[in-house]
Image: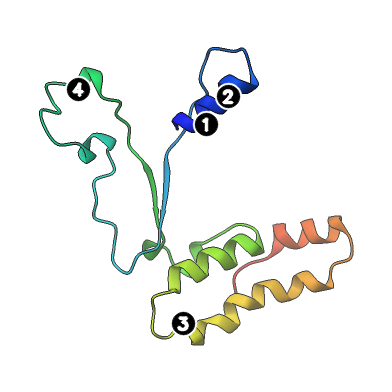
Amino acid sequence: MVKIWRVGLKQSSNRKRPIIIPLVLYHGRDKWTVDKRFTSLFEGPVDELASYIPDFEMLLYDLSQYSAAQIKGTSMARVTLLLLKHIFEPDISDKLPNIFMLLKDLLFYNTGLQYFEFLIKSEIP
């Protein structure tokens, strides 16, 4: 977050900082179990010093909690997310044909409008 704010200072004389929403895209073998609050990362008298410690909750997307049908977005985004979701599964090779099928249809579109229409209408097989 600090890096984003520093870049903003260099690019603009505006002293206000942009709002940054911390997002975690998790694709581990097991379900996410770590607390999503930033202050949970600190040790010591956190409660007593709460006024001086930035605190927020991370927005968590644990891919293990979503079915393939629930993963939406562009074909490339869905392929990426599905690969991340299934990467540790022993039967990933069985899932690859359906995952890569999402990219096959992109080869047949000549114009940006056709591609955009495909992105809007397509669903996961």
Residue 72 in picture, x, y percent from top left: 56, 59
Specify the quadrant that holds the C terminus. Answer: bottom right
Residue 78 in picture, x, y percent from top left: 58, 64
Residue 105 in picture, x, y percent from top left: 75, 73
Tell me the residue at 65%/64% (across/down).
75
Task: Give left or right: position of 6 versus 28.
Answer: right
Q: Distance from label 4 to label 2 (Cα)?
A: 27 Å
Residue that label 2 marks: 8
Tell me the residue at 28%/66% (across/down).
30
Of residues 119 and 19, the one nearer the viewer is 19
Specify few, some or many for label 1: CA neighbours under 10 Å numbering under 14, 14-19, or 20 or more.
few
- Which SS class for mark 4? helix
Residue that label 3 marks: 92
Q: Distance from label 3 to label 4 (Cα)?
A: 45 Å
Q: Distance from label 1 to label 3 (Cα)?
A: 36 Å
Specify few, some or many for label 2: CA neighbours under 10 Å numbering under 14, 14-19, or 20 or more.
some
Residue that label 4 marks: 50
Residue 54 quadrant: top left
For the residue marked with disc 2, what is the amino acid? Gly
Of residues 6 and 108, the one nearer the viewer is 6
Residue that label 1 marks: 4
For the residue marked with disc 3, what is the amino acid? Ile
Are the residues flagged by discs 2 and 1 in contact, CB closer than 8 Å? yes
Viewer-side label of 3, 4: 4
Viewer-side label of 3, 2: 2
